[in-house]
Every structure is written in structure tokens, then in C-alpha cells.
Amino acid sequence: RGTPPVLVAMRAMEGGDTLGTGCEVPTPAHSVRLRRPVTWTVTYVVLCTAALMFVALMPFGRSEANGNGTGVVQAQVLTSNHRTPRGSSGYDAEVKDTESFAFIDGGDDDTLGTKDEEEEAPTMREKTKDALDEDALDASNEATSASKPKCVFHLYRHVSKTGGTTMRFVFDRQTVFGDFEFPLPYGFDEKRWNGLLARWREAAKQWRSGNRKAPPKTLVELRGNWPSNWGAENFEKVLGDLDELRQEFGGGEGDDDDVGANSQNGGDTIESKTCSVSTSLLFREPKKQYQSFWRYYIEKKQADDLKTQEVNKKWPDIDGTAFWGKGFKEWAKNMPSMQIRELLGNKCTSQMRQPGYDAAWNSDLQQYIQTGLHTFDTKNCPYTIDETDYSRFLALLKRISVVGVTEKFDAFLLAVAEKVGLARLEYVKSNVRSVSETAKETATGGATSSETSEEEGVLEQVASFDIKAHGVVSQMQDDNEANAEGGRTEFQKRVKEYTDKTSVSKAGVTFVGGFPAPSPFVWVKSSDLKGSSDDLITPQSWTDTSGGGQAIAYIVMDEVSLVSRAKASAKGVGCVKGCTFDYKE
């Protein structure tokens, strides 16, 4: 950058050849020779001026001049490496961390403002506190902008009791960093689905044409059942819609994750702005899936044995062993291959939560007595499975981008993350039975070895297609890992690196993948904001201003909104979703 002006001036004084006794100053009359004292005074004035100019122009840190000719520092608020300090938790930790920085707008650099800058410029600090939400969004966008893929539409097909709740929590976690939108309830209807497709398609077009700053990044969970079963019953149509979307915006059939596949030199041309349109599915070892379903939905209905006639209740809205059978085996024998049925969607999945037996009231005994198996109308409720249905299942399976089994959940999650670009993978296992619960069940008369053998015999008959399907899915997962970047060996190394980060908090909570970073945003009930629209956050990855604004899966019927975690804490507003995996020591 050359010799500083201060040193040039000092060397000139030492040499006496430019500044000194020979310096002349023109006057209106004529030039006169100055006396030495005056000469030295002028010299020092020039030196001081030069020094001040040099200091003012000197670049500090790593910031460079921006487009306006100013060299300012831009703060990155929260990155994926940020961690809550041990001993702190929740909102308080977040507020403490974020307020320790000075957030300064305008530059292209990532350097954080220092504590000294914060204290010397209180007016700037006030300004930047108001801009906290926008900075956090920018930081989140910049942190993921270099990852692939950029433009995303991913649908996860949730089959009951296979790990879908954990996947939902992981998806919700992406939204509270502003990385993705997750807009639909898992039981969406046709109107909601078509509305999302139209919004996403328009957003992708705008991004490809350069009229949208950030690409749309959308996650969808399809389970069905409630509030609508349309998506589940029409899963093949949903897949067809995604095939069309992939053909229009992706790299082509079989190339759904190669962003920039059409670019010859890596440039950001319209042709290179292709999108990842993908799907995923989990299956589970059938006995474990059946037992989990039974414990979660059925066991309590069997336990509530009716002793007096309830004339207002009729099949199927009635509890007791007379209608639901005794124990796991009697219930399971009437439930053919539940996972395939749920995936196909049109195999009367409502039957899975209905009593399998008929019963009549015995006035002498003052209780219901079982009269036999309930006869389902197979024309209106085609709940059985045959080879034709299994062939349909295999055909559907080939159309799913990422498949896996619950027993290899971490590998499945990482495969989805690499396909879609998910960055927040830390999680706590959901609906897991503790060792103490299992031990208690065994000590109080749990299933004996002979009963277990009988149960397995029942399942081998009733769930035979699920058993075959589980083996096929597991093998497909292994085959897909062989096609992952670096091959299966390198992929398994990445899985191990991920699981090796697993940590246990002082409270005994196991976080797979390590302790999660606190998110800059949280979802809260919109009504709790008391109509203050200024607090709402709209990440650039969203296709609408609300990001869906629903938490139906959490039994919250009110609209929800994304807001700054710090502001939610200040207002005493509770988190509704996206905070399930918050790290609390």
C-alpha cells in the first residue's frame, strides 16, 4: 500500500530538503523567507493533518469497500456452529448471546462487530437491534447458499409408527432457522396441495428468471388420516404431480438432485438453475411396527372394559376387550400388512383403528360378550392385501428417491439431508420406550417366550407382505448407499461422524448428532402477538408470507407465526413448534 504519509514527512524533516528553513510561502505582495519558528509550526500542522488523513483512510480488520465506497463490517448472526453455553437454556441463552454483538449493515464481510465498537456507538447498536431479524435471515441464507441443492421440493411419505414424528420435528427445525418452509398439515386436502404446487412453481420460475432473490425450499409431510385423508388416498396422483414438477424444474428423470446439471462451466445461468424434486419413505420391521401401533392406539381401548351398557355407543365407537380383543395377538390377527396398506392409500386404512370383533350385551352378566369377528364390507373397505397390491407397492417404491428402514434411521436421515440440503440434523428420539418400562412389563407378566412365538406366527400370516416389503426396502437402502458420493464406505464414514457427535445432557437427554444450536426464530400462536404484524418473520425460502402458519400436528388449531426468539422471550410468548429439540442443560 506504499509508505505512509507520516513516515514520508518525518524523513523529509530529517533530510531538510523539502520542508525546513528554505520553505517559502507566497504572499499578496511578494515572497518572504520565514524564520525558523514559523517554519516548524507549519511543518507540524502539515504532519498532523497527514497523520489524521492516513488513520481515517486505513482499512481495519478484513472488511473491504462495498459498492458505495464504504468499508463496513457485516455481522453474521447465528451459524450452524453456534452453541448454547453449558448451564444456560431456552430463550435466556439466546438473548444473552445475540445481544453481545453489534450488528452492522452494509458490507460483504462476515466479521463480527467487536465489543468496543458496540460501546462507542450506542446509536448504531439501537439501529442494529431493530434489524436483528433481517440480519438473522441473511446469515441463514448465506450459510446455506453454497450448499446443493438450492431450489428444493421434498415430500416425505409418513407411514404410522416408523419414525415419522422424529422426521416431522427435524423438518420443523429447519424452518426456525429460515432455511426451509414446511407449510402443509400432514393431512392436507387437494385444494391445499394444488395451492402449494402453484405457489412453488411460480416461485421457481421467478428465481430461474432472476426476478426472485432466493430459490423456494419446501418440505412436505404426507400422512393422511386427519384433517383430510385425500393425500394418502391419492398418493399415486401426488407422485405424478411431483414427476411433472421434476420434469419442468429438475435435471430430468433420475437426475432430481443435480443442481446445475445443465451448466457447462458452473455459471449461474438460467439453465443451471435446476431444482431438486424428491421424495422419501421409511418402513419398519413389522413386529416392532405392529407392537408400537398397538401400544399407542389400541391397548388403552382394550383396557377400558365396559361393565354397564352404554346405549349411546355403538361399533366402532366403543371400547373393551369384547370389541377389540384381548392383548396384542387377538388384535393383530385382524390387521393385514398395515404398512403396505397405508402406503397404497386406498386399502381402507380406517379399519386399522376400528374394533375387529362384534359383541352383544348380556343382561345377566351386565357386560358385552364377543360374538365373533366383525365382517367388513370388502367392496367399501378393501382392507385385504394380495399379490396385485404387492406389485403396486413395488412399482411405487421405484418412484421414491430415498428409502430406508427405521432400524437404520440415522443413515436414512443423512441420505435425505444430502439429497435435500438439510443442515440441522440433531434430534432426540421420539416415542421410545424406556428400559425401565420394558423391565416393568416383563416383571408384571409380560409376554412369555411361547406367547412371543405365537405372536410371531400370527404376524407371519397376517403381515406376510409387510415382511417381504421390509426386506426389499432395507436392501434398496443399502444399494442406494453404494451409489452415494464416494460409495457406501465413504457414506458410512459420514454416518459414523454424525452419530459420534451424539451427546447426553445433564438432564439425561440424548441428542443424536450433538447438542443443537439455538434457533434465531420460533413459532408462536399468532393470537399471542396481539395483532403486531411488525414482529413477523418471512424467510426468503418461503413461497408465501405465512410459511403455512399451522401447527395441526401439535393439536394447535390456531394460526401460528414465525417470530424472533428474542422478541418472543421479551413478550413472554411460548413456542408452539420447531423447539422440540431445543437444548436445555
Image (cartoon, rainbow, N blue to C red):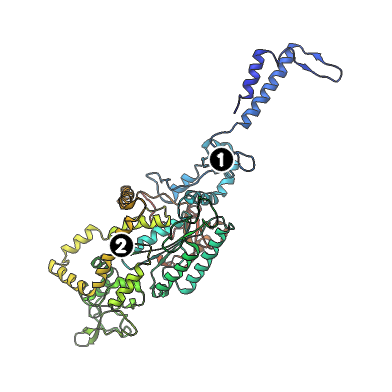
Which corner quadrant of the image does residue 442 belong to? bottom left
Residue 227 visible (yes or no): no
Residue carrying label 1: 73
Residue 540: x, y in percent?
53, 56
Q: Quadrant of the N terminus?
A: top right
Residue 88: x, y in percent?
40, 46
Residue 134: x, y in percent?
55, 51
Residue 584 visible (yes or no): yes
The residues bearing labels 1 and 2 have C-alpha atoms spaced at a distance of 49 Å
Q: Nearer the viewer, residue 204 or 164?
A: 204
State the residue lying farthest toward the bottom.
Answer: 363
Q: Nearer the viewer, residue 316 or 281?
A: 281
Q: Nearer the viewer, residue 159 or 582?
A: 159
Q: Residue at x 21, y 84 (%)?
A: 372
Q: Nearer the viewer, residue 75 or 446?
A: 75
Q: Nearer the viewer, mark 1 or mark 2?
A: 2
